[in-house]
Amino acid sequence: MDLNILWFILITVLFAGFFFLEGFDFGVGILLPFLGKNDQERRVLINTIGPHWDGNEVWLITAGGAMFAAFPNWYSTLFSGFFLALFLVLVSLIIRGVAFEFRSSDSNPLWRSTWDWMIFTGSFLSALLWGVAMANLVRGVPIDAKMQYVGTFFDLLSPYAIVGGLTTLFVFMFHGALFLSLKTTGEMAERAMKAAQGIALAAIPVVTLLAGLSYFQTDLFASLGASITLVGSGAALILASILIRSRKAGWAFILNGITILLFTVSLFWGLFPRVMVSSLNMQWSLTIYNASSSPYTLKIMTIIALVMVPIVLLYQGWTYWVFRNRITEKNLHY
Amino acid sequence: MTELILSRLQFAVITSYHFLFVPLTLGLGVLVAMMETWYAKTGNETYKKMTKFWGKLFLINFAMGVVTGIVQEFQFGMNWSEYSRFVGDIFGAPLAIEALVAFFLESTFLGLWVFGWDKLSKKVHLTTIWIVAISSNISAFFILVANSFMQEPVGYILRNGRAEMTDFFAVITNPHVIYQFPHTVLSGFVTAGFFVMGVSAYHLLKKSHLDVFRRSFHIAVIFALISTLGVAGVGHLQGMHLVESQPMKMAAAEAHWETENPAGLSLYASIDEQGQKNNFEIKIPGMLSFLLYNSFTGEVKGIHELQNTAVQEYGPGNYVPPVASLFWSFRIMLTAGMWLVLMALLGLYFYKTKAYEQNTLFLKLLLWTIPVPYIANIAGWFLAEVGRQPWIVYGLQRVEHGVSTSVSMLSMLIAFVGFMLVYAALAAADLYLMVKYIKKGPEEADLDEHLNSEVKGASLWT
């Protein structure tokens, strides 16, 4: 296996990890105003992700850095092409990031509700926009022979892309609700479970619609691997929704996690060996070869990644172990 | 206005803004870790109070650094895609390594530190803050490795229409970063040292929480003194290096138009940028030679000669950066630096004579000195980055060839205005919280903690 393929896999893993981890804290952020009836309850909700959201976000920063280092043309075309969409993503990530840190630092109710809405808005937009971006990668966007994006912002808002956005939105909300039903107690956990059951009912048709549209709008199903993982992803979602009906939140969380992982893998598998599809001419697509760094750089980066990634997984895993207990109003941290 | 000007303006604002938060993170992390170390060693509750008080300020500042850092990483692709294509093979690597090696550690262990006060043993908890402090400085190293490639490209070959890495070791041991890293990190320590001294001075003036702020002052004064002298010393060596590696930057920073031997140092110059001369200047004879070569003789090439050399090397074009901005950035940095050295020495004197608490003038001066390192930091980056012009990668790519070609003026304008609005609002919120917690002092925070310590899981977040 050449290093270009390895780096493509690594970036898939980084995005899958990012969506899995940040997926539930996007979900918690979206559910915050609906599940948290008063200030105390909202503090409980935020504290479930308090120690983790920052570490989760580093998955995205690493994915960005890895794209830049391994596939500079991919990084350049994507970030300049999806300029306004990324601007919105950045603003969303900024406002929710500071909101987590700032909201409890002042007791003024207006201060708190402002930041709580920032958390909601930032999480909502992020969850939606990542789906839009991923759908556009697979469906293809206007890219010319010089690897330049030649469309506009509105070209990114095709019905397919919007369904893609709704998919991540609902799946992440489901993920967040399941996470909350595991990390809280009593009435709050009950409320989260109810919410999860409801969201699952909305998520299933959206994902089905996306799969259906993918058949007509993309060449995802031309790849056997992508087809199997996409169907697997849908099956895991259905299973998760059945499990949460019978109140098995732990298993439902694991299965919905599998939904997210398989979904991400499916999209990247469908792309492979391309990294961005040109809707103008297949020949103009960016691939893991024409977008990549030199073999020397890939070799250096491979050595560093193979050493560091397992270490990162180890200590991040450890933090989830340290904070494994459920959060109640009696052990609020801030 | 063009896409180029707008992108440059945005880069300047976004990067400077990000760097308002970074230096304090670099230094205050180390100071908080030191305070907690004393707490772990002595069990003295005052040190715990100190750790928590300064730790809270550290966290408010850290959050701002993190969120503005994401924009920092993404803006290369967004506004500077052609630059990213050209240097991605080299420039992307330190950014990815920074995330993998340092930023993951920093963020993950900060979460552990904040929420882990009674979930982790004293020793493990202490370790977490040291990991945060050290990894944030490692972060700085890799980011500066990336910046150093723009200043002084090494370890590369021009191939396939771009710069490709041939020697990773050369890239991370770039002579430029050997000076820039200690200069930047120590500036961060200076920022934190004077921040802690200034805030302590505020409370000493008000005679509140004397135990906490006396000790904080003692730690900070030594820390600031060592770092300030360090910055000055490294800065001197860095200048000697830059005159070799980026002579045009140094000549412009001195508004030094004609080659001279010995060369004088201008204290003041009225610069005519169009006419490429100084209408009026006050010079110390031989001083520039002395600063650059440690000897009162020594040729320092002037802007005109360097421009001619550059034309021969790179073809026709203007290779002179904006002279007046550089001249004054440099002087602002130096003046601020001298002020800080003076204050640090005074601090040591009053600390030794134990007279600082009575000297209200000195304490007030310290309070008003808090912004000075910030001014020096930003002026220093202006010198580094504006002095690189017209290059985006020194000698390899001109800045106008680095800007994105596929982004419309309107998109850029929307993003620029959007970022400015968001950043202005955040600055107001950040400043409000910082001032609030500084004024509040440690004890009330502790009171909250007493309320919370009845229930399991009390921590810093009171």
Image (cartoon, helix red, strand yellow):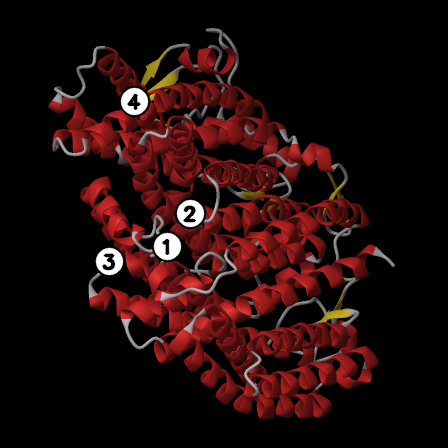
Looking at the rendered structure, the secondary structure element under dot 4 is helix
The label on residue B456 is 1
Identify the residue at horizontal 36%, vertical 49% (top origin): B459
Circle 3 residue: A106
Whether residues under marks 4 and 2 lie with C-beta atoms below 8 angstroms apart, the answer is no
Kindly report the distance in space between the C-alpha atoms of the residues bearing marks 2 and 1: 8 Å
Identify the residue at horizontal 32%, vertical 62% (top origin): B421
The label on residue B218 is 4
Give x and y (percent) for residue A160: 61, 87
Identify the residue at horizontal 40%, vertical 69% (top origin): A45
Upstream in sequence: badge 1 or badge 4: 4
Whether residues under marks 4 and 3 lie with C-beta atoms below 8 angstroms apart, the answer is no
Can residue B171 be seen from the camera position used here?
yes
The quarter in which the C terminus of chain A is drawn is bottom left
The label on residue B118 is 2
Can residue A219 be seen from the camera position used here?
no
Kindly report the distance in space between the C-alpha atoms of the residues bearing marks 3 and 2: 24 Å
Between residue B335 and residue A302, name the one nearer to us: A302
Give x and y (percent) for residue A97: 42, 60
Kindly report the distance in space between the C-alpha atoms of the residues bearing marks 4 and 2: 28 Å
Upstream in sequence: badge 4 or badge 2: 2
Looking at the rendered structure, the secondary structure element under dot 2 is loop
